[in-house]
Amino acid sequence: MPELPEMETYRRLLHEQICGAVITSTAIQREKTINLPPAQFGQLLQNNRLTLIERRGKHLLFHLQSGHVLLLHLMLGGFLYLGTAEDKLARTAQVTVFLGERVLYFHGLRLGYLHLLTPDQIDEKLAPLGPEPLNREFTLTHFEKLLEEKRGVLKAAMVDQQWIAGIGNCYSDEICFHARILPTRRIPELTAPERSTLYHSMQEVLAEAIRFGGYMEQPLYRTDELTGGFDERCQVYDRGGEPCLRCGQPLTKDELSSRKVFFCTHCQH
């Protein structure tokens, strides 16, 4: 599932490529993906200009000149492709948005959604989300206060979107590995130095993942050389049984609350 770095990469690239473009038409292949009847959805979007593209946690927000906002959550298997009517992928898009000659294809939205909402509806929808881990206001002191509220396992807390927004299975494991802390540790057991290390690892890993375009395999558009660059830089995620890049011991793959978890039992404690 795309996480904060993947969605931030999308936000930055889409802002460069299509911000200011006018939506000329839409095509809906799967009605359950949207929140309005297709005719009404298309009517409200037609001739509307994209004025701003933002990210909140794992969501993208496409702000429109009309004041409405398209809220995207890709969930598991979702991804975007920006092309033309001819330059498209050989698979079905659940929603297609035409921007003149350019076309934004929304793929894999069997679990995800693209909803057209008012600003008040957006505020209500996103209100439960926790703080953004890379915001300037998210200080070590703020993080330590959040840790005081939790009594469970570290991995479970880090993927809780109401605790901190944007971190999922991949980056929770990568952050813990960077901090040399087992993701299976219980939060009350963490020492003050470990809490500080975890905070700084969160900042470093997420910033690096954004710098290298996240781990999405599919480029956003034909000449996109950024998206997916972090995939080969993952230290533990999806590498169960392979040698640890830090100590050489085989990495462990386990399951925690029905989630995959990867770690090194030798250099994480």
Image (cartoon, rainbow, N blue to C red):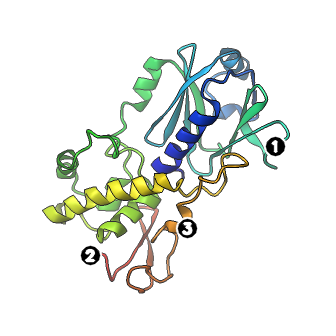
Amino acid type at circle 2 is His
Vertical position of residue 151 compared to residue 48: above or below: below
- CB contact under 8 Å: marks 1 and 3: no
Residue that sits furthest to the right in the current view: 86
Q: Name the residue tied to disc 3.
A: 232
- State the residue lying farthest toward the left: 192
Q: Which residue is mark 2?
A: 269
Closer to the camera: disc 1 or disc 2?
1
Q: At 29% across and 40% down in the image, what residue appears?
A: 136
From this view, report whether residue 64 is shown above or below residue 235.
Answer: above
Q: Assign a secondary structure to mark 2.
A: loop
Along the line of sight, the residue nearer the viewer: 68 or 257: 68
- Amino acid type, callout 1: Asp
Q: Report how many numbered discs are placed on residues in the image.
A: 3
Q: Residue 48 in the image: x percent, y percent?
A: 65, 16
Q: Secondary structure at mark 1?
A: loop
Q: State the residue position of label 1.
A: 87
Give the residue at the far top of this rendering: 66
